Image: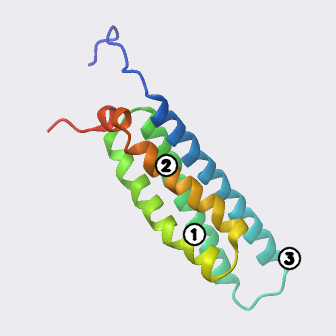
Amino acid sequence: MTDTNEAMPEVPQTVRTAAALVSLEVLCLLGGAIVLLIMATVRTTTRLWAALAIVGFALVAAAILALCARGLLLLRPSARSPIILVQLLALPVGYSLGFQAGRLLIAAPLLIVAAAVLVLLFTPSARQALDRVL
């Protein structure tokens, strides 16, 4: 059992901001999944299964990111690695969308949020709060 008198460590502002940005990504994933689901059911498509698979993938990704954002707020070191991985994957996707596909209005927020989360999680206060004791 843990002692109830122990104070929870203070969550640094950088970690709180990173968790808020990841939560924003979760909301965007949920919104995208809903839009895709509506488009797939309203329009005639020969690949309904593919659209539903993408919706399912987006929902699973949103759930995992939501759990990781909560983990950041609880200062769980294990929450940092999946979030960093997702942000590192978002950078080339955002680059491809923005500069190769010409969808800069979609890519710019993706790139800005991914870069911001990475910077926030590598600040000294975030690293100190989230580092594992070996």
Taking the image as shown, residue 45 lies to the left or right of residue 85, namely: right
Q: Position of residue 132 (x, y in %)?
A: 23, 38
Number of the label disc, if any, that sits on residue 94: 1
Question: On the image, numbered disc 3 is attached to which residue?
Answer: 42
Q: Residues within 10 Å of mark 3 (few under 14, many from 20)?
A: few
Q: Quadrant of the C terminus?
A: top left
Q: Secondary structure at mark 3?
A: helix
- N-terminal-most mark, 1 or 3: 3
Number of the label disc, if any, that sits on residue 117: 2
Q: Position of residue 46 (x, y in %)?
A: 73, 92
Taking the image as shown, residue 42 lies to the left or right of residue 25, namely: right
Taking the image as shown, residue 60 lies to the left or right of residue 76, namely: right
- N-terminal-most mark, 2 or 3: 3
- N-terminal-most mark, 2 or 1: 1
How far apart, in angstroms, are the residues tagged by discs 1 and 3?
28 Å
Q: Position of residue 79 (x, y in %)?
A: 38, 46
